Amino acid sequence: MPEISDLESALDFQEARFRAFLREVWSALSGQPNRLLSWQEVREHLHLGGQVYRGIQTVPLEKIVGSVDRYRDFDRAFLPTQSHTAHRWRSISRAFYNDVSLPPVKLYKVGDAYFVLDGNHRVSVARDRGQEFIEAEVIEARTRVPVEANIDADDLEILGEYADFLERTHLDELRPDQNIRFTIGGGYQRLLEHIAVHRYFMGLEQGRFIPEEEAIADWYDNVYMPLVRIIREQDILKHFPGRTEADLYLWIMDHQHFLREQFGPQVQPEEAARHFADHYSARLLHRLAHFVRDLIRRRDLLGTKPTAKKAEDTRT
């Protein structure tokens, strides 16, 4: 049996490496992320706080999305991407074949995502065997931002900006029910600029120094949330699939500024929101794209007729 398991583990590793190669090709062609996240990057971006020991738990393998020090040796599906992992990977594979009891892996937990501290090869082989869960010793690190199990590198950048924003404003403490989420980078910096402008005009109107904390809460209550309520009441978000209320807040505010330059300061947020949805919804842009495509097609068809006529005249 050991000879058979040696052979089978070698074949399994080669098959896993080949599948990792195919996934990498698909990632390059499709643009879909395929790399494991680095724990160091996550810790730095999300300003992780204190750690809490959670003991031994049964963890879904699909929620393990990164590693402390082996994030270059495996892809997002924990398939081996490097040949130098073969010896360790095959030894773990043989242990699985021979029903050898292995110790729990060690994981860091952030939100709903997990990162391997120890046991990368055990996670890889377990996933290769089709297991759905693994026994793990879990240490949870705290963060101010919500982290989902499907987080990728792009999400990490935006969540990092969110963490910076909350560190700067403490809005999650001032308004615990806030949930300002962007799908585009740079949004939180724009909000800081909005808050600074709002604080400036508050000071002018009230003739006094406005503490930053007061300005942040007032901006949220009297600028941000009123527009969000308009977005909800007019059900504008359904016209922009994949976007968030925060995305639309910025776009509508920019659009209101544009309309006021054209028509004067009387343009209200409700009008700007309605006008923006009417002119820039995904459905409208989809129809416009079809119109342009049909126009080009007709132009191409019409353009072939004079050429054909000219050729016929030449033959005559």
Image: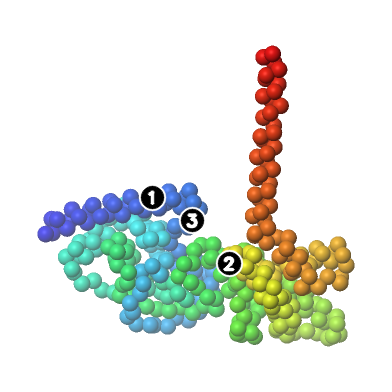
Viewer-nearest residue: 28 or 294: 294
Residue 151 position, x and y percent, is 49, 67
Instruction: Give, as a three-letter code, the residue at label 2.
Output: Ile
Looking at marks 2 and 3 on the same chain, the residue that comes earlier in the sequence is marked by 3
Image quadrant assignment for residue 99: bottom left
Viewer-nearest residue: 239 or 126: 239
Residue sitting farthest toward the left: 1
Looking at marks 2 and 1 on the same chain, the residue that comes earlier in the sequence is marked by 1
Q: Which mark is residue 32?
A: 3
For label 1, count other residues whose C-alpha is less than 10 Å away and answer few (under 14), some (14-19) or many (20+).
few
Q: Quadrant where the N terminus lies?
A: bottom left
Q: Residue at x 69, y 70 (%)?
A: 249
- Looking at the image, is mark 2 or mark 1 nearer the viewer? 1
Residue 135 position, x and y percent, is 30, 75
Q: Circle 1 is placed at which residue position?
A: 22
Image quadrant assignment for residue 168: bottom right
The reply to whether residue 170 is visible in this rendering is no
Q: Circle 2 is placed at which residue position?
A: 158
Image quadrant assignment for residue 230: bottom right
Instruction: Give, as a three-letter code, the residue at label 1.
Output: Leu
Residue 80 position, x and y percent, is 34, 56
Element assignment for label 3 = loop
Give the colour scheme shown.
rainbow
Instruction: Give, as a three-letter code, the residue at label 3.
Output: Gln
Element assignment for label 1 = helix
